Image (cartoon, grey):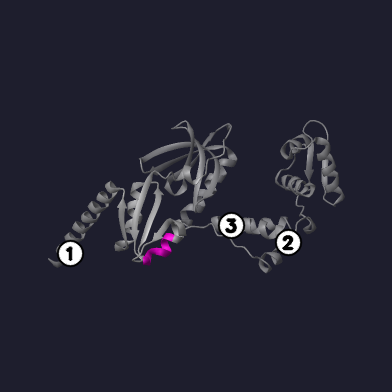
Amino acid sequence: MKIDRLIGILSVLLRQEQVTAPELAARFEVSRRTINRDIESLCKAGIPIATSQGAGGGISIMEGYKIDSTLLSAKDMQMILAGLRSLDSVSGSSYYERLMEKLRPGASNFAYGRDFMLIDLSSWYKETLAPKIQLIQEAIQEKKLLTFRYYSPKGEAERKVEPYFLIFHWSNWYLWAWCQNRQAFRLFKLNRMTSVEKTTERFPGREVPLPELSNEKIFPGEIKVKALFQAEAKWRLIEEFGVDSFQTQKDGSLLFCADYTDEENLLSWLLTFGDQAELLEPVYLRMKLRETIRNMEAVYDGIYETDRG
């Protein structure tokens, strides 16, 4: 639709100091003549757009211009504001809410009066996560290499990467980067990254494929799990896996079946239920869990004997 394209062109012009008509035509998959007509339509709408010819020329918009509120509906503005506020919840600042002032005159009254959606992307690790995100953003914009120490189930190692995307997925932040150590694109979880530093080395950039964010890719279900839970645990199973993850038995217990990704995470998760959960399959993990419980019992028996003595 033309109105969607006009808003898109205006968004590009607000983000970039200058852009050429061929660049806009390629981005919106229309002809250069269509772009020229769109620019004319924006000028007729009262938006101060300047064009310059020759080498280094292009299309630009007057600095400090604010979008006329008639271009965006109230619902459009509410959705934009919800998204911008969600980014503020990560940094703890009000940078993106201030950015709203560029999108609509008098946005401060709108911001507090008619909202229906609030998104909070902050986490328990906000004090360490926010500066880490800011540093990575700077590295991406400046095309500077990042170094950090990364912790994974396979161990820990120093990494040097070309950063490309910050990703929020499944309540966690990730970095999509080209790893020089592995010579491949990798997805790094920010909470597992320490000693993150932006180097002075620049990287030229490369063709970047979008990361595969399907649950099967990030959380491959390689372990077929069957467990029996007491009825008191129903709310947690519904919250974490959904209502279809278990079958209610005649005695009220819950037979849980799911595919799980990591053995250690599975055992840790089951232990959080205390005596409300019994792992049935796989059998080898049932034996491992029993051994873990016995070792825990020995630890606490030792503490008890020490305290009593």
Near-viewer residue (69 or 223) = 223
Image location (x, y in percent) of residue 69: 77, 59
CA–CA distance between discs 1 and 2?
Answer: 64 Å
The main secondary structure of the magenta stretch is helix
Q: Find out whether the residues at labels 3 and 1 contact each other: C-beta distance under 8 Å.
A: no
First of labels 1, 2 by sequence position: 2
What's under tag 3, amino acid-wise?
Answer: Ser
Relative to 195, residue 70 above or below: below
Q: Which residue, given by chain and number where applicable, does mark 1 sit on? A: 304
The answer to whether residue 265 shows anywhere in this view is: no
The numbered mark at residue 280 is none
- Mark 3 residue element: helix
Which residue corresponds to the image point at 34% horizontal and 47% vertical from the top-left?
263
CA–CA distance between discs 2 and 3?
Answer: 18 Å
Which residue corresponds to the image point at 38% horizontal and 64% vertical from the top-left?
233
Relative to 85, residue 3 above or below: above
First of labels 2, 3 by sequence position: 2
In the rendered structure, the answer to whether residue 188 lies left or right of residue 41 reads left
Q: Which residue, given by chain and number where applicable, does mark 3 sit on? A: 86
Report the span colored magenta. 231-237
What's under tag 2, amino acid-wise?
Answer: Ala
**For the residues carrying marks 1 and 2, which lies nearer the camera in this image?**
2
Tell me if mark 3 has few (under 14), some (14-19) or many (20+) residues whose alpha carbon lies within 10 angstroms of its own. Answer: some
First of labels 3, 1 by sequence position: 3
**For the residues carrying marks 2 and 3, which lies nearer the camera in this image?**
2
In the rendered structure, the answer to whether residue 29 lies left or right of residue 251 reads right
CA–CA distance between discs 3 and 1?
Answer: 48 Å
Which residue corresponds to the image point at 21% horizontal and 54% vertical from the top-left?
295
Which residue corresponds to the image point at 73% horizontal and 43% vertical from the top-left?
17
Relative to 168, residue 78 above or below: below
